[in-house]
Amino acid sequence: MPTPRITELPDAVRALIEKNSGPITDMGTVHGGYNSSIAACVRTGRRSPHTLFVKGLPLDHPRVWTQAREAKINPHVRDLTPALHWYEEADGWSLLGFEYVEGDHADYTPGASDLSQISATMGQLARLRAPGVELKTMTDRYRTYVESPAELKWFEGDSLLHTDWNPHNVIITKAGAVLVDWAWASTGAAWIDSALWLLWLLWLIADGHTAAQAESVAATHPAWKSAPSAGLDTLARVQERLWDSIAEQSPDNWSQTMKAAARAWNTHRQSQD
Ligand SMILES: Nc1ncnc2c1ncn2[C@@H]1O[C@H](COP(=O)(O)OP(=O)(O)O)[C@@H](O)[C@H]1O
Ligand SMILES: [Mg+2]
């Protein structure tokens, strides 16, 4: 379920930001993303102005644990993501204070110049080993969506994966594609990220990629060639089940479109047999 975004910072949140970064001089809500109660661009400091991206959830939010995971992963992915300046859990709030990056959300339409930049950043990520930080494994995440436990073997691996390739989590800056929102960082087979990206390339459906086009874009990712065909087939089935269940719980437009994208990919995989 999407978490409604708060546009006025509560006093407790302002106080925590000011404790860490000095007096707030300006702020604005950041659009994009679905999970955080607070996503704000905050300017602080009278003498040396500084711009932060502050992301927050109330401490009683069911997904508040994802904040700690982002805090832990940040030092290990510093070449791909903005620096985390501070992390606070107090007074009812969990807050992350990141360096603010200027840029636009990624454009996933066919032929967009962003695609090769994103693939380059994904390639950098694919070369990193999973850090010694406790992360969910893809086998755990997909356990309830496979037909039999034996299928889970396709997803095993020790690669660090971002897994949430929503275009709002990719910011195109002057220096290239930057990945934000590591809330769903996981470990698993190296090729999984390329296949999960593919699904978002299909997400646009009407004016987006066909399944075959999306696969050829995903194939620019260095790990795609290591993807076993049966592993891709299994992932396509898992994704269709997963998005069916998400779309049932939150029948908004984007989850319906994602469900259609997952179905289109699974149908494409089946037609290859
Ligand atoms: N460091 C940053 N600098 C500038 N904008 C950011 C930064 N991190 C995230 N954003 C923007 O804020 C939005 C929400 O942040 P995100 O971490 O994706 O949270 P959510 O959990 O709400 O999806 C992103 O879609 C992106 O547009
Ligand atoms: Mg996000």
Image: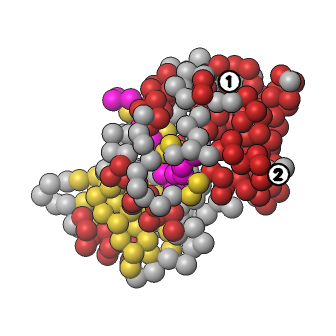
Instruction: Point out the tag, 1 or 2, that comes first from the N-terminus.
Output: 2
Placement of 33 over or under 217, stated as above or below:
below
Which numbered marker is on residue 47?
none
Answer few, some or many: residues within 10 Å of disc 2's Cα (few below 14, many 20 plus, some between 14 and 19). few
167 part of magenta stretch: no
Question: What amino acid is at disc 1?
Answer: Glu
Q: Does the numbered disc 2 mark a residue whose Cβ is under 8 Å from ligand 2?
A: no
For the record, the magenta segment spans: 174-188
Question: What amino acid is at disc 2?
Answer: Ser
Residue 150, image x and y in percent? 77, 49
Which numbered marker is on residue 215?
1
Residue linked to disc 2: 148
- Give me the residue at 35% from left, 71% from top: 88
Front-most of residues 230 and 238? 230
Q: Is residue 263 left or right of residue 182?
A: right
- Give me the residue at 86% from left, 24% from top: 273
Front-most of residues 129 and 2? 129
- Give me the residue at 76% from left, 46% from top: 151
Is residue 40 visible in the rendered structure shown here? no
| The quarter of the displayed image where residue 224 is located | top right
Placement of 33 over or under 95, stated as above or below:
above
Label 2: state its secondary structure.
Answer: loop
- Give me the residue at 68% from left, 41% from top: 154
Q: CA distance from mark 1 to mark 2?
A: 26 Å
Answer few, some or many: residues within 10 Å of disc 1's Cα (few below 14, many 20 plus, some between 14 and 19). many
Front-most of residues 235 and 112? 235
Q: Is residue 233 left or right of residue 33?
A: right
Report the quarter where the N terminus lies.
bottom right
179 part of magenta stretch: yes
Residue contact at pointers 1 and 2, CB within 8 angstroms = no
Front-most of residues 44 and 259? 259
